[in-house]
Image (cartoon, helix red, strand yellow):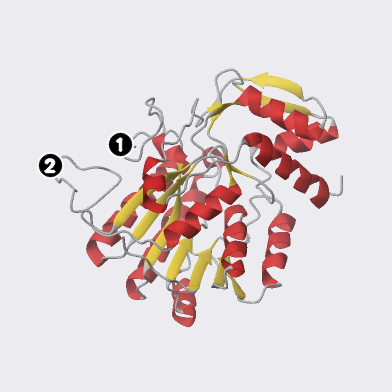
Amino acid sequence: MTTVDYQRVLLTGAAGFVGFHVAQALLDRGVEVAGIDNLVPYYDPALKQARLDLLTARIGFSFQNLDVAEYDALKAAYDAFDPQVVVHLAAQAGVRYSLENPRAYARSNLDGFLSVLEACRHHPVAHLVYASSSSVYGANAKVPFSEHDRADHPVSLYAATKRANELMAHCYSHLYAIPTTGLRFFTVYGPFGRPDMAYFKFTKAILEGKRIDVYAEAEMSRDFTYVDDIRDAILRLAGTPPAPDAAFDRAAPDPAIAAAPYRIYNIGNHTPVRLDRFIEVIEKACGKQAIKRHLPMQPGDVPATYADVHDLAERVGFSPDTPIEEGIARFVAWYRDFYKI
């Protein structure tokens, strides 16, 4: 297995939820980080600024406010910093918002990723690691979801853009020998999380004594994955770029591998939790019961997610394992402290 001892990482989406945690961990290891983010106000800009304030106070962190879809500016950042590894986490997130504002996803997730790939083409790096999503599995009913299964039936535009990113990465790995690794995140949660996510909304409403909207409670389950586990998987994989796989069979192509330096991995807790159980854990951490309004499943949602993480464990000897009881307790404690409750 090829490894890279990297000391300079260009990190897009540095002021985002996962990006913030990855940046902190890289800085803790003495890695120099060039952070990029355009601070788009999809959710509370004050939260993004709070993350950024903590990062800019650290030695070894530099920051540029720019949109990754602006190729010339991004390429200039590459050239100035000379990264060994690029971790691309910048994206327009959110399944339901993609129904309201589809063009935001085309610009950020498609044009933005093309800029990243082009920059890596013209300024070669040892490894490009990028965020995909469990949403790509879409209408698949076979669980657990495996990277080796086809993922050709997305049920939201967000999912379609993430699947497109994987296909775009394969093209650049094939054409220009850029080592790329796509990471399919499964429902990430934890401190400094995104306010548009259900666990964040539920915690806020429960503590304020307000009603929560619960969609298809009896039908929904999710593979909730604590952000520290996501972070650790990214850091382990960043130093292990893929090589072309000699086992790739063009007559029966495996979606997870390639004859190019290209791989895809699930990063999930491989333990799906029913939504009603998840709410119970939040109630216990908050010390209050939820006031629920039950609603049907929303367009773009899928009933269940469940990650097969065999390949991840085999590659880097690690798989996420933080129980929701532990992860939610940490999140609620952070929430109370951050919002002075």
| Residue drawn at the location 82% of the way across and 45% of the way down | 336
Question: With respect to residue 225, does 106 lie above or below?
Answer: below
Residue type beneath disc 1: Arg
On the image, numbered disc 2 is attached to which residue? 251
From the image, which quarter does the C terminus lie in? top right
Where's residue 145, x and y in %? 40, 33
**Which of the pair 79/161 is nearer the observer?**
79
Quadrant of the rendered structure where residue 53 is? bottom right
Residue type beneath disc 2: Ala
Question: With respect to residue 321, does 35 lie above or below?
Answer: below
Outermost residue toward the bottom? 80
| Residue drawn at the location 71% of the way across and 25% of the way down | 280
How packed is label 2: few (under 14 Cα within 10 Å), some, or many (20 or more)?
few
Quadrant of the rendered structure where residue 222 is? top right
Where's residue 54, x and y in %? 71, 66
Where's residue 118, x and y in %? 36, 67
Q: Earlier in the sequence, mark 2 or mark 1?
A: 1
On the image, numbered disc 1 is attached to which residue? 150
Q: Is residue 76 left or right of residue 147?
A: right
| Residue drawn at the location 36% of the way across and 49% of the way down | 264
Secondary element under disc 1, as helix, strand or loop, is loop
Secondary element under disc 2, as helix, strand or loop, is loop
Outermost residue toward the front? 317
Q: Is residue 263 left or right of residue 21?
A: left
Where's residue 55, x and y in %? 67, 67
| Residue drawn at the location 28% of the way across and 43% of the way down | 255
